[in-house]
Image (cartoon, grey):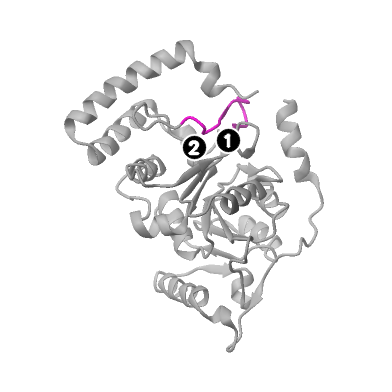
Amino acid sequence: MQNLLKYTKYLKKPIKNNNQIYFKYTQNNSIKGETYRSFKRVNKYFNKNHLIKEGGKRIKGYFRKDIKNKPLISIITVVLNHKKDLENTLKSIILQKYENIEIIIIDGGSNGSVISKIRKYENYIDYWISQKDFGIWDAWNKGIKLASGSFICFLNVGDYFTENSIKLIVKKINKKKNLDIIFGTVLKKKTFSGFYPDKINRRLNIFPSFVSTFVNKKIYKKFGLFNLEFKYFNDYEFIYRVLKNKKLIWDTTSKNELITVFDLKGFSSSITLSNKLLEEFKIRYKNENIIMLFSKIFLKMFSYFFTKIFFRNKYLKYN
C-alpha cells in the first residue's frame, strides 16, 4: 500500500499553470504548416461523420510543436461515462514535470456530467471530441490521426502517470536517437505487482504492456493503425505485428523508473479466458505460418507453467 500512496500523493497537489508551450496560429506563422493542415483535414472527416461536441486549445488557434531537446509527446485518453476516474487521469498528465505535452481526449458520446468534467480542464486540453464510435480501438485510431506529437502514448481512464513519467521518457528519446518505441514500467493498482519490460521475448510470448508504451508516430504510418478486425487484443496484435521487424529500434525503462499505474478494473478485466485464447490464436495465425504457430503455442504453454512455478516473482512481483 505504501508504494501506491507514494505514487498517488502528488495527484492531490493544486494545479498551477506550468509554463505550457503553445504557438498561436496566424496567417504568417510557421505553425500554419503540417500541424494545422493535418488538424483541419481530420476535423473535416469528423464533421462528415456527425460531430457532436469538441473543444480545447486548438479550437482557439493554439497548437504545439517539437522544440529542440523538448519533443512533443501526445497523450491520448479515451473515455465513455467514467466521470469518477477521469479527473485523476487528467491531473496526472497536467501535473507532469515536463511541459511539452499534447493532451487529446476521445469521448465515445458520454452523458453531460462527463463533458462538464472535460470542460473543467479545457484550458489544459489541446483537443477533445465527443462522438459515438465503434469502441475503444476505433477511438484509439481517431486519437492517432489527431495527434501531432513525435511520440504517442495512450492513458486510459483510471490509469495515471507518476509525476516524472514523461520526463523519464523524454530523457530516453534525447539520449538514443531514432527510437521507434519505448516500453515503460507498469504498476498494477490492485495487486501491487508490475511489469518491467527489460525482458521482452517474442518467442516466449513475453510482451510489454501497451498501457505504458510510447510509439513514434512514424511507426503508425509505416505499419498501420490498430486492426479493427479483432475485438479484445488489438494492442497486442499491433505490437506483435511491429516486433516482427528486426530493424526496430526500441528501449525500455528500468524497474525503478515507474511510468504508469494501471487500473485492473478497466476494459481488459471483462475478457474471459476462452476469448483471450481464441483471439490470441487468431492473431498468431494471421502473423505466422502454421508450423511456427503450433510450435509457439506449445512453447508458450510450457513456458507459462514453467514461469508460473519457478519464476513468478522475477516477472510479476514489484518490489
**In front here: 89 or 25?**
25
* Residue 117 image point, x, y percent: 67, 57
**In front here: 53 or 214?**
214
Image quadrant in which the C terminus is located: top right
Residue at 60% over, 42% down: 159
Residue at 44% over, 71% down: 42
Which region of the structure is painted magenta?
A: 186-199
Which amino acid lies under the numbered mark 1 shown in the image of this protein?
Answer: Val
Q: Is residue 297 magenta?
A: no
Count of numbered circles in the view: 2
The quarter holding residue 67 reads: bottom right
Give the overall secondary structure of the magenta segment: loop
Q: Which residue is mark 2?
A: 209
Whether tag 2 and tag 1 are in contact, CB under 8 A, the answer is yes
Measured Cα–Cα span from mark 2 to mark 1: 7 Å
Labels 2 and 1: the sequence-earlier one:
1
Q: Residue furthest bottom?
A: 28
Q: Which residue is mark 1?
A: 186
**In front here: 148 or 264?**
148
Q: Is residue 202 left or right of residue 187?
A: left
Which amino acid lies under the numbered mark 2 shown in the image of this protein?
Answer: Ser
Q: Residue furthest left?
A: 290
Q: Is residue 282 left or right of residue 100?
A: left
Does residue 167 show up? Answer: yes
